[in-house]
Amino acid sequence: MFQISPQILALSVLAVSYIILFTEKLNRAVTVLLGTSFLIFCGVLTQETAIASIDFNTLALLIGMMVIVGISEKSGMFQYLAIFSTKIVKASPRGILLMLGFITAVLSALLDNVTTVLLIVPVTFQITRNLKLSPYPYLILEIFASNIGGTATLIGDPPNILIGSALNLSFMDFVVELLPLVAFELVLLLLIFDLFYGRKLTALQANKDSLLKILPKDMITDSSLLFKSLFVLGFVLIGFIVAGYLHLQNGTVALFGAALMLWLYTSGDEHMNRDQKVEDAFSLVDWTTIFFFAGLFAIVFALETTGILEFLGDKLIYLTENSVQKATYAVLWISAIVSTFIDNIPFVATMIPTLKSIEGQMGGREAMMPVWWALSLGACLGGNVSLIAASANVIVAGFASRENTHISFAKFLLLGLPVMIISVALSMLYLYVLHFL
């Protein structure tokens, strides 16, 4: 259409989509769906190729986990965990800071970082109100901990879901490769926050006593659902671990877990009530994110079919002199820096087929694995730099604004930049020791 080359059309759609995503002038799902539709109208894609480009394993994994976590949250288990943690540290503001940071990181690895902050941040405000403390240091630590913790597993951060699905990596592949580094970086983060914030936090004993009066068991709203949720979450996590041995996709495990959760959640209900609960459960799915992924897959496929990604891959090979080690470091830092300015999801979605196109020239999949881990680490850890670098950051900032706690973009950048540089530098050293020493 318009006698314009398909390469220019595909690049134009990608560029305009990135600009709109960065400025947030349109909903992100609407943005990519408009871009995909335009590419189909122009003949760069067909409806069939656009649909075929969608990675349904990724969508299945996202939908399944959203349903499971959404229903589990109704039991009050996550609120119970937060209040129980305050009991352990006897309502010490310093202890609570470290406990909430640790819990946020762990839940981000086992669930995902966006869901985790949605569950933890409201409890944080409840705790700090009782102690009459500023929630600011707690919220900042939770942002950093969610992005670092989410880096450790397949399901912790959307970039990992994309990479895992594209390479057919298992849950344990991510754990074995990344957990040691993430655990070290988390400990270092907690020590730094304890040094700069924790030791200065104090509260009146009367306020501590008020917080200690809140019983963890009062947070549980449905004990039956609690046990059902724990069973399903445990079953799904075990499923992720053994999926590779059973030749199953992670999306299959997640959807089966969601179906099992729905069955247990609605068992014993009357027909009308059962159907209503199922509809309510499906409303917990973030369909904006699902359609965003679907449209994004199609746009990236247009770049792939028009040869643009192969061209970028050749440039990467040229700049890194066909060295896997140089490519690893380049991808690590580029991913972290780019993720500062734009959402890391579209960037990773674009990079995956680019890196796939050069695997043959770089020695194959096994030889290229350090580069893939660098993409994961750079994209996930780069999310700590600015308030717009990761979805979890935006959500926490929104919660803070509604509670009259302003998180300044510039002030956060001054805190996030050193955290990102240190964590990415440690990642570079870790990858060197693990793969190139």
Image: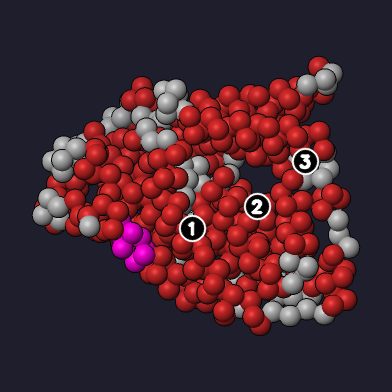
Which residue is at a point 45% across and 45% down the rendered structure image?
175
User: Three-letter amino acid code at disc 3?
Assistant: Ser
From this view, report whether residue 94 is shown above or below residue 380: below
Q: Is residue 138 magenta?
A: no
Q: Residue furthest bottom?
A: 200
Q: Is residue 360 left or right of residue 37?
A: left
Q: Residue 322 in the image: x percent, y percent?
A: 12, 50
Going from the N terminus, do you reach mark 1 or mark 3 first? 3
- Depth check, front residue: 419 or 354: 419
For the residue labelled by badge 3, is the local secondary structure a helix, a strand or a loop?
loop
User: What label sits on residue 118 in the rendered view?
Assistant: 2
User: Three-letter amino acid code at disc 2?
Assistant: Leu
Q: Residues within 10 Å of mark 3 (few under 14, many from 20)?
A: many
User: Three-letter amino acid code at disc 1?
Assistant: Ala
Please tell me whether mark 1 or mark 3 is closer to you in this view. Answer: 1
Which residue is at a point 69% across and 36% down the rendered structure image?
230
Q: Residue 209 in the image: x percent, y percent?
A: 87, 70
Please tell me whether mark 3 or mark 2 is closer to you in this view. Answer: 3
Going from the N terminus, do you reach mark 2 or mark 1 first? 2
Q: Tags 2 and 1 in contact by the CB under 8 Å rule? A: no
Magenta span covers which residues?
A: 424-431
Q: Which residue is mark 1?
A: 183
Q: Which residue is mark 3?
A: 75
Q: Main secondary structure of the magenta part?
A: helix
| Number of numbered discs on residues | 3
Q: CA distance from mark 2 to mark 1?
A: 22 Å
Q: Tags 3 and 2 in contact by the CB under 8 Å rule? A: no
Tell me the quarter of the image containing the N terminus.
top left
Q: CA distance from mark 3 to mark 2?
A: 15 Å
Does residue 7 appear anywhere in the picture? no
Tell me the quarter of the image containing the C terminus.
bottom left
